[in-house]
Image (spheres, helix red, strand yellow):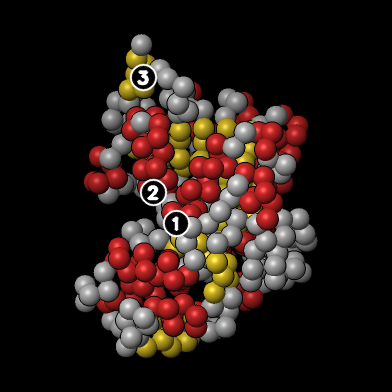
Amino acid sequence: RQVASDASFHSVTFSESDHPRVLITGGLGQLGVGLAKLLRKRFGKNNVILSDIRKPADNVFYSGPFIFADILDYKNLREIVVNNRITWLFHYSALLSAVGEANVPLARAVNITGLHNILDIAAEHNLRLFVPSTIGAFGPTSPRDPTPDLCIQRPRTIYGVSKVHAELMGEYYHCRYGLDFRCLRYPGIISADSQPGGGTTDYAVQIFHDAIKTGKFKCYLRPDTRLPMMYIDDCLKATLEVMDAPAEALTMRTYNISAMSFTPEELAQEVQKYVPELQMTYNVDQVRQAIADSWPMNFDDSNARRDWGWKHDYDLPELVTTMFSYLGSDSR
Ligand code: AKB
């Protein structure tokens, strides 16, 4: 039997099966399109709906169902979940650390009020809910090297405060209402074919583009600023793994995940193996430097490794090789 939905321009048709029916919010950010691609391979193209409030590029629009979803509009969101019989929700809408500091009221609305809508809809419709958290959920009074899952969390950004709030609210809804809430704290994510939007770790993506285009890169963080980072494929793999994990395996609902940790100086040295003439200069942005200085330098992810077998594939040399094989160091 086929069930048709008209909530999308694509007239989505779901065949009845055991596959989850997935909604991804904030789907046009750095991670949504890659996640949709992975999930569609597994669950079928029409079982995964990408959503955002912006107009997608043609290739995104034609690669599978895409709909408008505003997480601040409770009724709109609820209608989408009901009409499309959604069972899994990946909640990627958020303002990141640097852009959040530039617009606190908007960050508060999207990251906190938006999350409340998502939690209520997920609890009401019995959804499995994934919400990403971040190294930014820690602050200057947290242990920084390494940072364990459970320790002091007093972040000094609206982004960090909203993510601690999301972790706590998700875990509270899990205990109080049985919501199947799952959360990973992501490091800075590095990807070749999608751009991050307004974070503190963005330099680690931009350096590849600038090295290839101009042979120069001006870094807004000090050369010795160490932060945890991860290649996008590892991030998406971890996200799927924690969503797949049997509930009994999860001794916690919010886990750190880690792959590597480096400074701008160390990244530049690795990039110079492909672009030897790269000229790296530093022009420190005080806002982003202060944020980075309050974040973990190394992330302790031993609980994820123990509970659901988390294991990263990409270290720094592997990451840089992969980025250049996508972007092409000789495309100048
Ligand atoms: C940011 O820099 O704000 C994000 C993050 C680490 O959460 N990339």
Dot 2 and dot 1 residues touching (CB under 8 Å): yes
* Viewer-nearest residue: 310 or 328: 310
The disc, 3 or 1, on the residue closer to the chain's N-terminal end is: 3
**Badge 2 residue CB within 8 Å of ligand 1:** no
Residue matched to label 2? 34
Q: Residue at x 67, y 38 (%)?
A: 249
Pinpoint residue 158: horizontal percent, then vertical percent: 63, 60
Q: Residue at x 68, y 55 (%)?
A: 302
Mark 1 residue type: Ile
Pinpoint residue 262: horizontal percent, then vertical percent: 54, 74
Dot 3 and dot 1 residues touching (CB under 8 Å): no
* Helix, strand or loop at mark 1: helix
Measured along the vertical axis of the image, is residue 14 above or below residue 214? above
Pinpoint residue 125: horizontal percent, then vertical percent: 58, 25
Residue matched to label 3? 15
Crowd tier of the residue under label 2, counting other residues whose Cα lies within 10 Å: few below 14, some 14–19, many 20 or above: some
Quadrant of the rendering where the C terminus is positioned:
bottom left
CA gap, disc 3 and disc 1? 30 Å
Residue matched to label 1? 232
Crowd tier of the residue under label 1, counting other residues whose Cα lies within 10 Å: few below 14, some 14–19, many 20 or above: many
Measured along the vertical axis of the image, is residue 310 above or below residue 284? above
CA gap, disc 2 and disc 3? 23 Å
